[in-house]
């Protein structure tokens, strides 16, 4: 990320061709469960974001390639935006002509504005929150269903092809914030509220042909997609078929074996430790293993509205045997133990000594004879329940009384993102809404807390922290970067809303006939923008 002007020529299509790739065939994705959401305004989890790129287009987007930093380009927009007055308060986006929904109608500024308006509705506020929170500084808005209005404060539909964002304070990272799926266009007449999740309308190269939640999803071509408008997506396969309910071992083993249709399959979940180590050591499989660092850290989030005593939070941090927890989750192939909120390659990352080395004795000293009763919520499925029990066992060894409550995966995030939820602890691995330290650390702003859809997972609300975040968020990116790194250490030492556990390396396999799939440097999960079949 820089303050340098963007290259507007990078926003034109078509996407760069992949040498040797040819159109056709069916790409098969294997995953362990249903997607949390398909509605773009509700999409926030990694694999759903990756799938979203095939079905929906956004105002801006990252054009990525394996192992390289992404370039922000205009996707629906002709460019990554224009800072109208040069002070970051007013941003203008002109839409490309010829971008069409699956029904053939042309995407207009009204469709984009309506999509953004939907993201304010409490019942579908599960998605990215930065843009919504910034626009709310212009005044209250409850979304189109409750308010009856589609006029979002601060969002102007200047004409059918032009959107203008107005903010009371500078928002220098606005072009990055509008790369999230909340800016995907939605035709108002097609909106079915919460049911839109089942079959949203496509503006990308693929449309949803069928969807049986938790079982299967089939994508076929949007016949009205024009590659000349699209700088990201090559859309080589004719179809994408998603098989759900395949555990992480089976999906990776099937991709490794590559028999029948599995030759065209991608395992979306990381390979378990034994399989990952065996695949990496096998010269016939190693070329098909995605073994990539990511911008992700697994954290134990502490609900500070419930666990209000800092000494108890510090005891939690000291009690956690991070190496043992990592071994249960996947071992050294999956990542390295860490104690910083930011990932090591983050802009502005700064290393500092671990304030909370593993020490049962120190944890018990801080508890001073107390036995705090804490509720840890876990997503369902063996990949997560074993992980959660390993965390609980660490805490129990120090004197905590831990109850692990397992919920279906689609229910997990909405529950913990609701104010006054009954849970004390939850495991999170959060992609920033864009690859910047601010996209993660600004979520600790207590002024952002609402009744539902919170991205302040810990419910930290400290006046000094809030003031610091407000100030840093208005600074030019180059000026703010180092200060975000300093805030990482301050939050960890003095507030401890998250206990960082370990960095995340994505290790997964693809079938022998799959090419062009890589781990997104921004999302940390496989993406399919340039996927092709041989």
Image: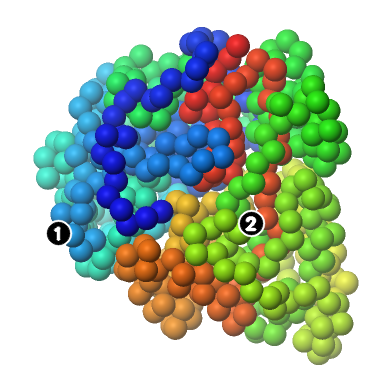
Nearest the eye: 270 or 333: 333
Image vertical order of residue 285 relative to residue 472, above or below = above
Nearest the eye: 43 or 279: 279
**Residue at (71, 26) in percent of width and height:** 287
User: Would you call the spot at circle 2 few (<14 residues within 10 Å), some (14-19), or many (20 or more)?
Assistant: many
As drawn, which residue projects farthest toward the bottom? Answer: 368
**Residue at (77, 25) in percent of width and height:** 285
Q: How many marks?
A: 2
Nearest the eye: 21 or 299: 21
Image vertical order of residue 9 relative to residue 209, above or below = below
Image vertical order of residue 45 relative to residue 168, above or below = above
Look at the numbered disc 2 and give the secondary structure of its residue: strand
**Residue at image mark 1:** 85
**Residue at image mark 2:** 297
Quadrant holding the N terminus: bottom left
Q: Position of residue 78 (x, y in %)?
A: 24, 36
Q: Position of residue 230 (x, y in %)?
A: 34, 27
Q: Position of residue 514 (x, y in %)?
A: 63, 19
Q: Position of residue 284 (x, y in %)?
A: 79, 22
Please indicate whether residue 385 sits to the left or right of residue 72 in the image: right
What colour scheme governs how the chains and residues are painted in the rendered image of this protein?
A: rainbow
Can you tell which quarter of the image residue 192 is in? top left
The answer to which of marks 1 and 2 sits earlier in the sequence is 1
Answer whether residue 358 is visible to the viewer in this image. yes
Disc 1 and disc 2: Cα gap in Å? 37 Å
């Amino acid at each position: 990320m820089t303050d340098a002007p963007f290259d507007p020529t990078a926003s034109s299509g078509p996407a760069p061709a992949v040498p040797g790739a040819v159109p056709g065939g069916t790409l098969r994705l294997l995953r362990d469960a249903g997607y949390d959401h398909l509605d773009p305004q509700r999409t926030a989890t990694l694999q759903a974001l990756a799938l979203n790129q095939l079905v929906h287009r956004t105002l801006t987007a990252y054009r990525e390639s394996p192992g390289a930093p992404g370039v922000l380009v205009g996707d629906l927009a002709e460019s990554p935006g224009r800072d109208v007055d040069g002070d970051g308060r007013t941003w203008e986006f002109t839409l490309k002509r010829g971008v069409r929904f699956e029904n053939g109608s042309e995407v207009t500024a009204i469709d984009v504005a309506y999509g953004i308006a939907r993201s304010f509705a409490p019942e579908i506020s599960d998605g990215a929150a930065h843009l919504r929170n910034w626009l709310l500084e212009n005044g209250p808005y409850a979304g189109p269903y409750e308010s009856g209005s589609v006029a979002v404060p601060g969002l102007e539909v200047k004409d059918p092809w032009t959107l203008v964002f107005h903010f009371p304070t500078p928002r220098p990272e606005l072009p990055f914030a509008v790369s999230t799926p909340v800016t995907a266009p939605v035709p108002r007449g097609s909106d079915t509220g919460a049911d839109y999740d089942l079959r949203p309308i496509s503006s990308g190269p693929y449309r949803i042909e069928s969807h049986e939640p938790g079982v299967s999803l089939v994508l076929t071509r949007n016949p009205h997609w024009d590659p000349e408008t699209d700088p990201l997506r090559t859309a080589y396969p004719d179809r994408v078929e998603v098989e759900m309910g395949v555990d992480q071992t089976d999906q990776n083993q099937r991709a490794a074996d590559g028999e029948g249709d599995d030759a065209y399959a991608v395992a979306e979940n990381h390979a378990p430790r034994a399989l990952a180590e065996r695949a990496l050591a096998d010269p016939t499989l190693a070329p098909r293993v995605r073994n990539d660092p990511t911008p992700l850290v697994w954290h134990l989030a502490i609900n500070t509205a419930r666990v209000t005593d800092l000494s108890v939070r510090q005891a939690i941090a000291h009690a956690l045997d991070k190496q043992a927890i990592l071994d249960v989750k996947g071992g050294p192939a999956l990542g390295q133990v860490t104690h910083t909120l930011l990932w090591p390659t983050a802009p502005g990352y700064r290393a500092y000594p671990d304030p909370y080395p593993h020490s049962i004795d120190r944890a018990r000293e801080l508890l001073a004879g107390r036995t705090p009763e804490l509720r840890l919520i876990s997503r369902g499925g063996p990949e997560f329940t074993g992980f959660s029990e390993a965390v609980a066992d660490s805490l129990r060894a120090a004197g905590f009384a831990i109850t692990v409550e397992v919920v279906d995966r689609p229910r997990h995030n909405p529950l913990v993102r609701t104010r006054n939820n009954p849970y004390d602890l939850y495991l999170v691995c959060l992609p920033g809404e864009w690859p910047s330290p601010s996209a993660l650390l600004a979520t600790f702003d207590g002024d952002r807390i609402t009744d539902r859809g919170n991205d302040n997972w810990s419910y930290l609300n400290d006046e000094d922290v809030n003031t610091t975040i407000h100030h840093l968020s208005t600074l030019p990116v180059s000026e703010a970067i180092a200060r975000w790194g300093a805030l990482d250490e301050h939050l960890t030492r003095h507030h401890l809303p998250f206990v960082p556990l370990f960095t995340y390396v994505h290790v997964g396999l693809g079938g022998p006939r799959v090419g062009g799939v890589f781990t997104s440097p921004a999302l940390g999960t496989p993406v399919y923008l340039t996927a092709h079949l041989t």
